[in-house]
Amino acid sequence: MSRLRFWKQTGGPLRPVSAGWDLFALTCAVAAAGLAGLIVVLVAADAWYLVGHGVPLTELRESLTRPAIRRAVAMSLGTSLCSLVLSVGVGISVGYVLSRWRFSGHALLDTLVDVPVVVPPVVIGVSLLAFFGTGVGMAVKQALKAVDLSLVSGLGIVLCQFLMAVPYCIRAVKAAFDDVDRELEDVALVLGCSRWRAFRGVTLPLARSGLLAGGVLAWARALGVFAPIMAFVGTGPRVQVMPTCVWLELSVGNIEVSLALALVMLALSGMALLAVHALAPGRRWP
Amino acid sequence: MTGLALQGLSVQAGGFRLGPLDLAVEAGEYLVLMGATGSGKTLLVKALCGLAQPLSGRILFGDAEVTQAPPRDRGVGYVPQTSALFPHLTVAGNITFAAWARGRRPAQALAEVADITSTLGLGPLLERSVTTLSGGERQKVALARALCARPRLLALDEPVSALDEPSRQDVCKVLKQSHQRFGVTTIHVCHSIVEARAVATRVGVMEAGQLACVGRLKELLARPPASAAARRLLGVDEAADNPRVPGP
């Protein structure tokens, strides 16, 4: 205990003298340790299962390099990067509007942005099916067909991923814009900037770490989208992504391959989360 | 020649209304507007900068009406109380920001404003990050940034209120020197008679969104206004009550 306190006092910011352990502090510590332990156990279980069942590494490598799996990995990475670009573009615009402007309908927009986060993911897929089955959606589908594009493709996957990922990006970007003093923008305007130039020269550089964190979060979320893609795009061989691949391999009994894919996704998501934490303003790392 | 004219200017901010104000400031004049907190000083500065939309009335810089002009086209140099320096830029980056805003190269702009940086004594600080500056240095950089935009009007919103006494005196001296050197028409709002004495050509007192009086400080002290708040700000009653306080 004394070693831990010494390390924190020398390495961290100013701290008050410890108030000691009571029931409240103990409950909090147990909850934190329990949650961290549960997540570590779940992640370790994937690797442990593969090791415990003596799955040879060569066999796993062969399974993971099958054309179908490679195509799914490439599709996942390609579509998630497209979703990232879209999410950042829309996230910056909507985040700026929510942070800087006050208008009737502000609270409604603020609420609508969070809808994809709170509804069950499959509902997004079903809603997309319903939208493209009627009225304007049908017209859009016809227009896409006229230029040889189909929604049962990377396009549909990007749409699902974008809808699921963009709220996370907007939240992070809005928080970053909120932290930029508005008076700095006012001064930039008076000094001769247009709105765009003030945004580019002052707001954007000062909100940089929040924007990067929002982008990484959006990418990680897009990479993991499963239910909307299952419902809207399906699981055809040309539209498989890593999450649907994990499910399909599991459903035909290839638990080893699905676990190996799961580990790949965990590694990618883990790296993204580490990046988010490292980029957070004022964060000391580790 | 008139540098700034306000004709029946009214501005609404929430439940507070500024004006209607009528005021004429000669070109090259340094007018200090004093007022208690909530008297509308900052709102007036924001209206001059184009950051607050007037309800009615006109703002003229020289012969040009700027009432509806966007902030970038007014030619105002703005120094807020907090200095509002851009923390991601160096002192040189801040000073040449107005040039960058107009699409000009900052290095060339810095050479063109050497007279301003030398008058304000900022030469040794140019490459420093603004986050490492003292309060007084920050206000000097904010003043240089505003002057480097070559403004028609300098609007200073309590530029020394947040400083300690030595820095306050130092910045007031710099304000006086730069006004003498560059002769920019200046509106300086504050609530300190000491500040007004140090820099003003003329002094005005604001009370509840209205201009209670305006004139040369000596004249105002010789013929004090009727308003109790204005008399308190000018230190008139205090001087009468306490002979040790320097009078007019």
Image: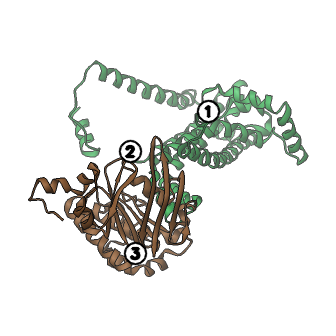
Location of the C terminus of chain A by quadrant is top left
Q: Chain of mark 3?
A: B
Residue B69, horizontal then vertical, whole percent: 57, 62
Q: Residue at x 71, y 31 (%)?
A: A228
Mark 1–mark 3 distance (CA, rounded to whole Å):
50 Å
Chain ID for label 1?
A
**Colour used to depict chain A in the structure image:** green
Q: Which residue is mark 2?
A: A286
Q: Position of residue B33 (x, y in %)?
A: 34, 60
Using the image, determine if residue B64 lies above or below residue B46.
below
Figure check: B201 above or below A76: below
Q: Chain B drawn in what color? A: brown
The structure residue drawn at horizontal position 50% and vertical position 30%, both measured from the top left corner, is A44
- For disc 1, the marked residue is A108
Q: Nearer the viewer, mark 1 or mark 2?
A: 1
Residue B188's place in the image compared with B179, above or below, is above
Residue type at mark 2? Pro
Task: Classify mark 2: helix, strand or loop.
Answer: loop
